[in-house]
Amino acid sequence: MTEKKCLRCLLREAFPADYRQYVASILGTIRPSDRASDPVYEERLARCKACDQLQNGTCMGCGCLVELRAAYARGKCPFRKWENPAR
């Protein structure tokens, strides 16, 4: 029997080992001045998780990995579900 993957999950939920090795390493290269704060990041991910365009950690509207796009302070959702906070 094949294990089903959650289509509406973030990468860190669906592929925990791969996430830690790939996405986390990329997140670590973002300069602190370019990163969204942890609360902003988590709020963005919550909005992405509730969006019907999320599939296997990818935004089907633009093709990005939502966990990377949400990490950038100047990031924004292509559907305007979240924007970069005022500076």
Image: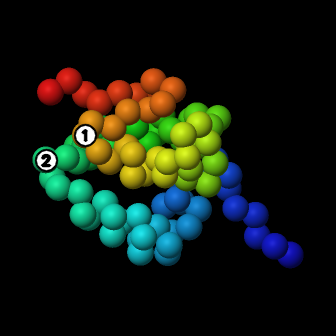
Q: Are marks 2 and 1 in contact (CB under 8 Å)?
A: yes
**Label 1: few (<14), some or many (≥20) within 10 Å?**
many
Instruction: Looking at this view, name the residue that lies furthest to the right.
Output: 1
Which residue is at a point 27% across and 36% down the rendered structure image?
74
Question: What residue is disc 1 on?
Answer: 73
Question: What is the distance, in whole Å, between disc 2 and disc 1 at their CAs?
Answer: 8 Å
Identify the residue position indicated by label 2 in the image. 33
| Mark 2 surroundings: few (<14), some (14-19) or many (≥20) residues within 10 A | few
Give the number of callouts.
Answer: 2
Q: Is residue 42 visible?
A: no
Eyeballing the image, is 47 above or below 24?
above
Can you say which quadrant of the picture contains the C terminus?
top left
Asked whether the viewer can see residue 21, the reply is: yes
User: Which element type, helix, strand or loop, lies under badge 2?
Assistant: helix
Vertical side of 35 occupied by 75: above or below: above
Left or right placement of residue 21 versus residue 28 in this view: right
Q: Secondary structure at mark 1?
A: loop
* Residue at x 46%, y 67% (from the top left corner): 19
The quadrant holding residue 6 is bottom right
Q: Quadrant of the N terminus?
A: bottom right
76 or 18, nearer to the observer: 76
Residue 44, position as x, y percentages in the image: 40, 37
Name the disc covering residue 9, or none: none
83 lies above or below 7: above
Nearer to the camera, 6 or 71: 71
* Amino acid type assigned to the residue bearing label 2 in the image: Ser
| Percent position of residue 57, x then y | 55, 52
Amino acid beneath label 1: Ala
- Horizontally, residue 46 falls left or right of residue 86, namely right
State the image coordinates of residue 25 (x, y, percent, origin top left). 33, 69
Q: Residue at x 22, y 47 (%)?
A: 35
Picture residue at 75% right of the left edge, 64% below the top: 4
